[in-house]
Image (cartoon, rainbow, N blue to C red):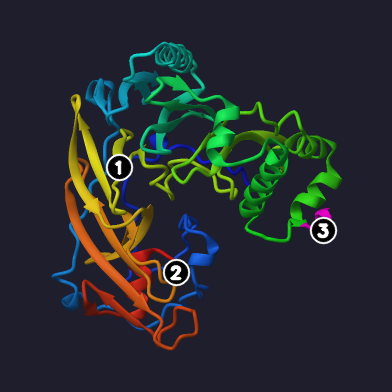
Amino acid sequence: MKRLSSITALIIASAVLLSACGSHKPPHIEITETDHRSEEDVPGLTDPGLPDATLIAPEETTEATVPAVEAVSPATADRYPTGFMANENIRTDVYTAQRGDMTAGFYMPKLRADSEDAEIINNEISDLTNSLTGNEECIGADFIYFRNTDLIFSILITAHMSDGSCSYRCYTFDTTEGTRLTNEEILELAGIEEDDFYTLAVDAVIGFISSGYGSTDIFSPEGLNADSPLGQAVAASDAVAEAYSRTFSSENLNTNMSIFPDSDLGLCYIADIVSADDETTFRHAITHTGKEIASTPTSLMAGDECLADINFDNMCEYLKLTGDGYVTAYTITGDTLTEITTIPSADLSYGTSYIYEQSGYIGTRVLRAGLMNDPSNLSYELIILSSECEIISDITISWSDSNGDGQITEDDAFTRDGEITSFAEWFDLTGIS
């Protein structure tokens, strides 16, 4: 199994553009990234089988041509902010450390409450910061903020390691009492009985492992499917078998483990989970449905507020989910947040779009916001940002399942900024194959 952890956006390659294709015919698109929506929300996508004919003539694309995006130079230590007020409950302190030629950024939360528990938490985070910045194997850290209720919030701190693994620290805090919630209080907040905890945690881990293999037949009601990739790995290797057993042990999954509620009061778990490729377990933060909680290149919006490098300069921007389902992205300038754009979607991810240039179709990285929840009528807003986080291009492209077959075919309807466009261009711009 491929390692399920993703290296943080802090070490995404600084070049935004892929190499140009010499032909005016777009390349066959092979995008390995996937939307972070559940499979139930996404229709079956067919291979576009792009036509051999020229799809878009140069004269037809003059107005739509997007300016070339120059490669972004990695941020240096002197460009990083020192900190900013994230919201009424959290301040963010920003630290840097050199990792060879790369500057690693550490975005660490600090509680703004005045209480004994808040002081203890802030001291723990300060100790953690010193440990991470001094660890050459740690290439950065950030956090995700969850509004559990009007009075209670959780934070998940993620430290990203050079081998692709992560370590985590979580806190849940009651602003009225000024106290950190215990696991017993978190279970009560999430409405979970202690006797049900292990079963629910197992279900979450099973969901996570199954999604990692892209399959639903890893497990059966009787247990691990012996014919599945994981089942075969467990049978073939004592190390994998031991890691598998450890994953579902009561020492790993118990009411004393690190847990926190998400924004919907669903319980989230931090657990060691088997990875067949490496014959060991890796630490993951997962929701009760088995979805990994992380700000990664393919899934930017996690929680209610989080950090993500949206212009690929190795320096994070701040994302906030508003009450009406919009996401606002901010640059961090000095000690203030400056709005870049507000997008009418919480379904925000990275994508690769193929955009026509005179030299051919150029692959460029975009912010991709899903604008509709109807799986038979998909619509995306595609935004290209400069290294200064200025919007270079903003395109809305939509697909409608005209023949109602649940698949994207040439017979369906496609528009670009409200104008009819081609089947092939929809694929080129959305980067979905």
How far is the residue under mark 2 from the one under mark 1? 35 Å
Q: Which of pointers 2 and 3 lies earlier in the amino acid sequence?
A: 2
User: Picture quarter containing residue 125?
Assistant: top left
> Is 9 within the magenta?
no
Rounded to the nearest angstrom, the CA distance separating label 2 from label 3 is 33 Å
Mark 1 surroundings within 10 Å by alpha-carbon count, few (fewer than 14), some (14 through 19), many (20 or more): many
Disc on the earlier residue, 1 or 3: 3
Residue at the disc numbered 2? 28
- Residue shown at 79% from the left, 47% from the top: 233
Disc number for residue 320: 1
Would you call the spot at circle 2 few (<14 residues within 10 Å), some (14-19), or many (20 or more)? few
Q: Which mark is residue 227?
A: 3
Magenta residues, as a range? Answer: 220-227
Magenta: main secondary structure equals: loop
Q: Residue at x 18, y 65 (%)?
A: 65
Of callouts 2 and 1, the N-terminal one: 2
